[in-house]
Amino acid sequence: MLQPSIHLSVDAVIFGYDADEGISVLLIKRNLGPFKGWWALPGGLVKPNESLEHAVRRELKEEAGIEVGYMEQLYTFGEPGRDPRNRAVTVAYYGLVRPKNFRLVAQTDADDAKWFNIKVLPKLAFDHRNIIEAAITRLRGKLAYEPIGFELLEPKFPFSDLEKLYMALLDKELDRRNFKKKIMAYGFLEETKELKKQVGAGRPAALFRFNKKRYEELMKRGYNFDLFY
Amino acid sequence: MLQPSIHLSVDAVIFGYDADEGISVLLIKRNLGPFKGWWALPGGLVKPNESLEHAVRRELKEEAGIEVGYMEQLYTFGEPGRDPRNRAVTVAYYGLVRPKNFRLVAQTDADDAKWFNIKVLPKLAFDHRNIIEAAITRLRGKLAYEPIGFELLEPKFPFSDLEKLYMALLDKELDRRNFKKKIMAYGFLEETKELKKQVGAGRPAALFRFNKKRYEELMKRGYNFDLFY
DNA sequence: CCAAAAGTGTTGGTAGTACACCCATGA
DNA sequence: TCATGGGTGTACTACCAACACTTTTGG
């Protein structure tokens, strides 16, 4: 049976976090095809012999010079008509990075690559706004039972960074005391002996570190996280 | 850019439930191609102008004569090598039906269509065992915060059917009194005035009904279900 | 000594869990 | 009258949520 002309691509919703900036998404400016000059998610066609995840990582490298640690499949978007040229099905992924680790480098398909705060997104090509919204929803849901947020923080961080991250992601206020009690009770965070070098006034903060080994042990025992608040 | 020969298909993991039989999955026996004579998930190639979900529903109808109410996208499987013939990417869906509502009818690609208890699956074609396992995991996870199980019950059912369903899905014992207290507290179940006609000995059970309207109101208000136990 | 951020405990309410006996029917 | 499945309440515990003052530093 012949199956003509269904184009299969991947797209990536890459979230970055900065304590001042909040949550942002990586977008590239299209320099060809339909929606030329519009902002879009990084992504592109899957090659015949690479895995889907490989395709995403390759495109991210090519289009923005970024390498992502945590990444996960989000959803596959395939409505006829989502691409004006032809039938196009795209497998969307989402991932988390620390923006400061990368200098964005636009190449190939992209004029430009930039971080946009999720609260002020520009006009987006194709159905990419939908895709981003789906990714935000999924990210929030996932946070409720898995502590993936650590991917967005420095290896050692003051506890207040974690608080701010969760408040930004969940978009609501959290009580510092209760939040700390809860997180510390899980036991996958450890306090280092270091203190944060001062930036301005205020008491210097102790630095914490995510203990991945401890976390994985807990997971294996079928531990049920419930990080919502 | 040309993209030769990536074949895009859909596959469906359809769960059925019967109070005596437990949870089962719909499989079809392949009558052609590789894995001829093996059991496989219903599914097939996506046509150029149909949506992914439409493709799944069409295939289910063609291959087994089944129409599914609740259905959801599960995951997209696309490792090179998962189909010995060529590069094949499949978007998997999962759905829930009441097996008694259908007489299975094998047609087109299928020699035969049959329900298999999830605890005694036969050898499966391609990576379909993985897909089924992923679907079971997802179904269990989903149950934790959304009462989708009702799709598997008759419109009116004795409360014990719901208990048994949850015990089968979660594969563990539940305390009848606590389970009922919890479910009833949500308020989306209503007791009808009818009693179940007797089958054997025992007190006749009151029949309950899922109140979808009430459920949707609760959802809109951002209600957080927590059905685990 | 003032401003800024970090650190820390107690209490009341609610929801989860454990647990055992009576009721209505058919055979 | 016995066997089968249906129906129900209480008490303990553990976790969640609300809440405000002290400490350490820089300026």
Image: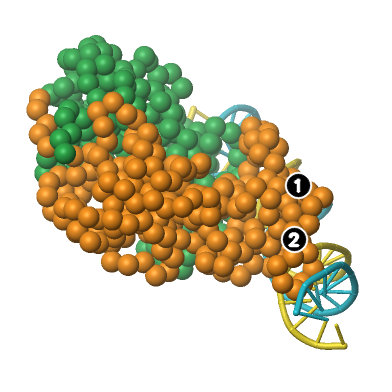
Chain colours: A green, B orange, C cyan, D yellow
Count of numbered circles on the image:
2
Q: Secondary structure at mark 2?
A: loop
Q: Which residue is mark 1?
A: B190
Cα gap from disc 2 to disc 1, whole angstroms: 19 Å
Q: Front-most of C27 and B18?
A: C27
Q: Position of residue B121 (x, y in %)?
A: 36, 66
Q: Is residue C10 left or right of residue B162?
A: right
Q: Which residue is mark 2?
A: B197
Judge depth for marks 2 and 1 and give the one in front. 2
Q: Secondary structure at mark 1?
A: strand
Q: Position of residue B88 (x, y in %)?
A: 19, 44
**Residue at coordinates 47% horizontally, 35% vertically from top-left?**
A137
Q: Front-most of B69 and B67?
A: B67
- Tag 2: amino acid: Lys
Q: Front-most of A95 and A202?
A: A95
**Residue at coordinates 15% horizontally, 35% vertically from top-left?**
A2
Residue A213's image quarter?
bottom left
- Tag shown at residue A52: none
In the rendered image, the quadrant that contains the N terminus of chain B is top left
**Residue at coordinates 22% horizontally, 17% vertically from top-left?**
A85
In the rendered image, the quadrant that contains the C terminus of chain B is bottom right
Q: Would residue B213 be visible to someone looking at this image?
A: yes
Tell me: residue B173, above or below residue B150: below
Q: Is residue B63 left or right of residue B198?
A: left
Q: Would residue B226 be visible to someone looking at this image?
A: no
Residue A220's image quarter?
bottom left
**Residue at coordinates 26% horizontally, 16% vertically from top-left?**
A84
- Tag 1: amino acid: Glu
Tell me: residue B178, above or below residue C1: below
Q: Chain of mark 2?
A: B
